[in-house]
Amino acid sequence: MAISIDRRVNGQRLRTLLGTWQRPGPAYQALADGLRALTRSGALPLGTRLPGERETADALGVSRTTATAAYDLLRDEGFLVSRRGSGTVTTLPPGSRDRAPASLGTTDDALVDLTAAAPAAPPQLAAACAAALDQLPRHLAGAGYAPLGLPALRSAIAERYTRRGVPTTPDQVLVTTGAQQAIHLLTSSLAGPGDRVVVEHPTYPHAIDAVRGAGARAVPVPVTLAGTDLDLLDSTVRQTSPRVAYLVPDHHNPTGTSLSAEGRARVRELARRTRTVVVGDETLSDLTLDGPQPAPFAGDGTADRHVVSVGSASKSFWGGLRVGWVRAHPDLVGALAQRRAHVDIATSVLDQLVTVELLACAEDVLAQRRRDMRAQRDALLAMLAYDLPEWQVPVPAGGLSTWVDLGRPVATALSALAHGHGVRVAPGTAFGVGGTFDDHLRVPFSQPVDALRHAVDGLAAAWAVLAGAPAGRVGAAQPALV
């Protein structure tokens, strides 16, 4: 089957994507591992035209023989295909094309997928679906299109904000097909080619995709384990005059940090003072595992011309629902609804009805969800401390993952090796711009403990191979996990 080629990368871009790909052993094998990992993760989309072997060798500072051997190996494995006039492009081996890319999860039962930080559905989902089906006949007489969202769901979301201290009316709520669509709609509506968009660094990968998709330029502001650098955020907004800034204030993905109440107030004041729209992604707000839930990003809700909140049912309930929302000024809500009409018109009615039912029993669902995530987090941290004590593993107060410091820039190589040991994992480079964070790994704890046990075994085995040492304690007696 012919491959449609609509993307290409040059040698310098390939070097940026690879990060620090070298490791002990043959250089061609290490390079092939890095390219394979980029293809599996989606960082090199299928059909991407790679630079020629000479250009690759010059950009990476290796011999042409090394580049040729790496390309030949990937051709033999089915990850590259070359045709006269088309160059060399990325593909997948026969039999694996029906599988989702690593960044979207996997259906391969032999692999533990750590690329998606998302929990399974709660037990209450089945009852919510049954109740939604009972409500569905009331909507069947219409066309099924509600560009702003079903009134019942918009009201339920507005009431939820109001209960948290952010007075909200339904006309301030737009229901979207997941938070990802909300982010894309906001970015494409507020920014265009050449405009600047401030993002935290690292950040949610699809936010970077949204900025690039709008033709805008991402301006990074660093996030450390101490949180977002608010002084630098302030100066960056003032100096670059961005059209929009995107933040993850609650259990930041991937670092796990949260803005303090004072920090949130400071960001709202910055938005008002500079008239910059600041988007707060609160999709992980419900998953506070230690201490009180962070204060709402929107504060008292009076700054909604410049402070926008994004929420989702995906992390709190289930990703399969594909229901998200935007809380914003009614004028912006209307503009976003008009823009989304060019994409999908409206969100599934049945999914919205299910979400209404789940919001009605949210406290019960979330109480159990937090207990499960807390137990899985603690189990994962104990495993990593025992099997990989050289890694620096922070304890996040919420969210679904921990941001591991490997101590050296080998995350891309590690993710490539881990696949051979039964684990899919996203390297830190997926969460930054310019190939940075190759010394970090995002490790989710959203899966059951048994799956996490297999994942840590695979990571430890891959780490041992990366270090050029035997597998060591992999498979040794483990500490009791509570």
Image (tube, rainbow, N blue to C red):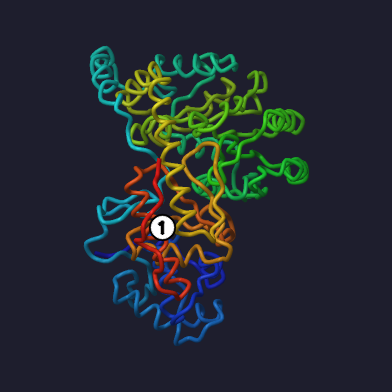
Q: How many marks?
A: 1
Q: Nearer the viewer, residue 47 or 361?
A: 361
Please state the horizontal and vertical placement of residue 108, each as a whole percent of the image. 26, 54
- Measured along the vertical axis of the image, is residue 45 above or below residue 308? below
What is the quadrant of the C terminus in the image?
top left
Q: Tell me: 313 left or right of 135.
A: right
Q: Nearer the viewer, residue 320 or 415?
A: 415
Q: Residue at x 66, y 18 (%)?
A: 302
Q: Residue at x 46, y 41 (%)?
A: 400
Label 1: how many residues lie within 10 Å, few (<14), some (14-19) or many (20+)?
A: many
Q: Nearer the viewer, residue 240 or 15?
A: 15
Q: Residue at x 61, y 28 (%)?
A: 297
Q: Residue at x 28, y 19 (%)?
A: 132
What is the quadrant of the N terminus in the image?
bottom left
Please state the horizontal and vertical placement of residue 220, each as a whole percent of the image. 65, 50
- Measured along the vertical axis of the image, is residue 99 above or below residue 284? below
Q: Tell me: 227 left or right of 333.
A: right
- Measured along the vertical axis of the image, is residue 468 above or below residue 322? below
- Measured along the vertical axis of the image, is residue 110 above or below residue 21? above
Displayed quadrant of residue 460? bottom left
Q: Tell me: 238 left or right of 344.
A: right
Helix, strand or loop at disc 1? Answer: helix
Q: Which residue is mark 1?
A: 41
Badge 1 amino acid = Ser
Q: Tell me: 90 left or right of 392.
A: left
Please state the horizontal and vertical placement of residue 130, each as a whole percent of the image. 23, 20
Please state the horizontal and vertical placement of residue 468, each as a whole percent of the image. 45, 76
